Image (spheres, rainbow, N blue to C red):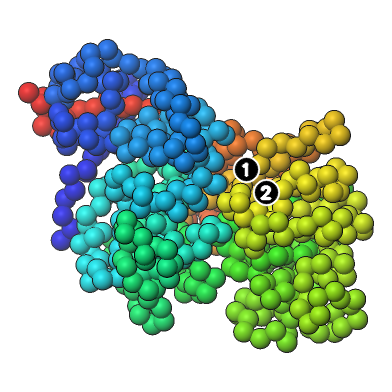
């Protein structure tokens, strides 16, 4: 039988006062050590007496607004982004509500610190900056202890799990157990942007070893010091994990994150019909790119079905984006074969084609027949590189998911700009150091004609007296709203159609239609409201597909609002009465 957690609690709503009331199981010093319950200097005079914290905090009672001012001042004094990241994580481990309130009030400024690009550096240094445990580490040697590990979690009612095995962290590769920074960061955005109560989230790191020699040699490394487990042993471990999730969290939303190219797609295919799950690298990335391109082609005065797309990076993300864009073209009236013919995908060995060999199943569907490039003028011999493809295929859209910095060179971009009036260029690789192109260069090389969105945040570009706002084509626009919609509607599965609905909802919110210099995506400061709109679209689609209980639109909107947490302090009540 699952043991009772110390952190079981009941959040009720005061009928007379309209305030939230939280029952807590601990008092005194223990209460101050629980980040979900701790208020710091904001404990009221009554709470200081009834909860046994009088004298344990300074006598002045602060409102949360005063605490935010103090914390922001401390944040500003940190000299580097990594130090700011460490400060914010320490605040989260001390006072969860205050952390999210601070983040909410400085959302656009702090999101790049908590997540991309700074989270990449934080993962590289994870073992060295480790302060306090968060979430669950499930290592391969502990595979027989799966139930005990799940039972050790702090909170019982989990709605969202983000899991990684650390093999493909952003564009940085294998980080082993240090990849835990990604699930922690993703779930912070679920709460910050999507309103999911942080007590209902659970980050998980599946530690199956690492092939990163730097980690294995590092005496400070905190993970299992072993080469990566692969093959059937790996699959059995993943299966054991999924079975444990189903036993302990039968209604949870499970998000796969930063798995390798070889594992991401096949794990999604294996488990998508067994539980409510999705892969954000594949589906979330495809949705945000689709939304961005829906707006970009409209701003360029064309249609999506008329585009020619070159995708550099043929891993799970690149293939997933291509699949969804192709489906969107079909929805606009193209025959599937015609839509498919408008895509050219390049991997590490250049253009995918039938004679290349050793292609993954998803890559094979995008391999070109030799007759399509038999008469091309080529510069790189047997290898058909990006310059060859751009010169001959004449793309109108150029997308990068390769993790190869600077791949979009001046000569390639200028060649592309020769035959399209408004080149659409999306260097999407994270972190910033891995971006395929710099927006200022892309705009300069196209004489200000390019429509640019990036995966990591970049500053706005001033070119010939005009300011170009660079949209961050970040999954955080999509996955928090998808999660909120799935949870609020009670959806049993996550489908491709739900991500299409999310992309359309985001595209409909773009300010491009009302601005002479189009901004491809809404500002990040509006992301909480955007997540609500996306949640409604996703929940509606789930109902239409018969995957969620039917309700009226107003009732669904009520469910979305009821599941949307605001970072404010509840009134605390001790289950046992007065602490003294």
| Quadrant in the rendering for residue 343 | bottom right
Residue at x 19%, y 48% (from the top left corner): 5
Q: Position of residue 463 (x, y in %)?
A: 82, 36
Question: Considering depth in this image, is 132 or 326 the residue closer to the camera?
Answer: 132
Q: Position of residue 293 (x, y in %)?
A: 74, 52
- Alpha-carbon neighbours of circle 2 within 10 Å: few (<14), some, or many (≥20)? many
Q: Position of residue 47 (x, y in %)?
A: 20, 21
Q: Quadrant of the C terminus?
A: top left
Q: CA distance from mark 2 to mark 1?
A: 7 Å
Q: Quadrant of the N terminus?
A: bottom left
Can residue 200 be spotted in the picture? no
| Quadrant in the rendering for residue 249 | bottom left
Reading the image, the residue beneath label 2 is 454
Residue at x 50%, y 38% (from the top left corner): 81
Q: Is residue 146 left or right of residue 170?
A: left
Question: Considering depth in this image, is 277 or 554 the residue closer to the camera?
Answer: 277
SS under mark 2: strand
| Quadrant in the rendering for residue 408 | bottom right
* 456 is higher (above) or lower (below) than 517: below
- Residues at discs 2 and 1 in contact (Cβ within 8 Å): yes
Question: Considering depth in this image, is 327 or 527 the residue closer to the camera?
Answer: 527
Mark seen at residue 457: 1
Q: Position of residue 141 (x, y in %)?
A: 26, 71
Residue at x 87%, y 67% (from the top left corner): 391
Q: Is residue 20 left or right of residue 107?
A: left
Residue at x 36%, y 34% (from the top left corner): 91
SS under mark 1: loop
- Alpha-carbon neighbours of circle 1 within 10 Å: few (<14), some, or many (≥20)? many
Can residue 379 be spotted in the picture? yes
């Amino acid at each position: 039988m699952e043991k009772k957690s110390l952190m079981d609690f009941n959040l009720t709503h005061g009928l007379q006062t309209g305030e939230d009331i939280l029952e807590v199981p601990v008092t005194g010093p223990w209460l101050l050590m629980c980040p979900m319950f701790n208020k710091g200097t904001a404990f009221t005079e009554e709470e200081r007496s009834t909860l046994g914290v009088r004298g344990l905090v300074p006598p002045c009672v602060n409102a949360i607004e005063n605490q935010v001012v103090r914390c922001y001042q401390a944040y500003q004094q940190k000299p580097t982004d990594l130090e700011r990241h460490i400060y914010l994580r320490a605040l989260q481990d001390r006072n969860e509500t205050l952390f999210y309130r601070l983040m909410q009030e400085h959302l656009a400024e702090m999101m790049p610190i908590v997540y991309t690009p700074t989270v990449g550096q934080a993962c590289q240094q994870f073992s060295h900056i480790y302060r306090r445990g968060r979430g669950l580490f499930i290592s391969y040697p502990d595979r027989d202890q799966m139930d005990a590990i799940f039972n050790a979690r702090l909170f019982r009612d989990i709605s969202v799990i983000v899991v990684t095995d650390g093999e493909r962290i952003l564009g940085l590769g294998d980080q082993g157990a240090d990849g835990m920074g990604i699930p922690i960061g993703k779930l912070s955005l679920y709460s910050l942007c999507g309103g999911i109560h942080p007590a209902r989230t659970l980050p998980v790191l599946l530690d199956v070893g690492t092939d990163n020699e730097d980690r294995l040699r590092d005496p400070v490394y905190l993970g299992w010091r072993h080469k990566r487990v692969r093959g059937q042993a790996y699959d059995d471990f993943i299966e054991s994990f999924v079975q444990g999730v189903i036993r302990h969290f039968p209604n949870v939303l499970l998000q796969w994150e930063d798995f390798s190219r070889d594992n991401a797609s096949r794990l999604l295919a294996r488990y998508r019909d067994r539980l409510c799950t999705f892969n954000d690298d594949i589906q979330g990335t495809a949705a945000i790119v689709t939304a961005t391109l829906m707006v970009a082609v409209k701003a360029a005065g064309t249609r999506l079905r008329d585009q020619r797309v070159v995708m550099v990076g043929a891993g799970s993300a690149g293939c997933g984006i291509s699949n969804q864009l192709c489906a969107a073209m079909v929805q606009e009236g193209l025959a599937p074969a015609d839509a498919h013919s408008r895509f050219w995908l390049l991997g590490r060995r250049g253009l995918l084609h039938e004679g290349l060999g050793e292609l993954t199943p998803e890559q094979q569907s995008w391999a070109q027949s030799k007759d399509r490039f038999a008469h091309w003028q080529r510069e790189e011999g047997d290898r058909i590189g990006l310059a060859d493809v751009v010169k001959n295929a004449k793309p109108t859209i150029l997308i990068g998911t390769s993790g190869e910095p600077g791949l979009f060179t001046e000569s390639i971009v200028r060649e592309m700009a020769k035959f399209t009036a408004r080149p659409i260029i999306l260097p999407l690789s994270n972190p910033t150091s891995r971006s395929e192109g710099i927006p200022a260069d892309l705009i300069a090389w196209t004489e200000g004609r390019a429509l640019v969105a990036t995966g990591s945040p970049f500053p706005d570009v001033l070119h010939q007296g005009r300011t170009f706002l660079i949209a961050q084509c970040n999954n955080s626009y999509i996955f928090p709203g998808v999660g909120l919609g799935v949870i609020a509607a009670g959806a049993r599965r996550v489908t491709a159609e739900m991500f299409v609905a999310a992309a359309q909802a985001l595209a409909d919110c773009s300010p491009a239609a009302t601005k002479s210099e189009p901004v491809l995506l809404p500002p990040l400061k509006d992301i909480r409201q955007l997540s609500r709109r996306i949640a409604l679209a996703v929940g509606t689609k789930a109902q239409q597909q018969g995957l969620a209980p039917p309700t009226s639109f107003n009732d669904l909107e009520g469910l979305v609002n009821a599941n949307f947490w605001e970072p404010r302090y509840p009134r605390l009540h001790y289950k046992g009465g007065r602490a003294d």
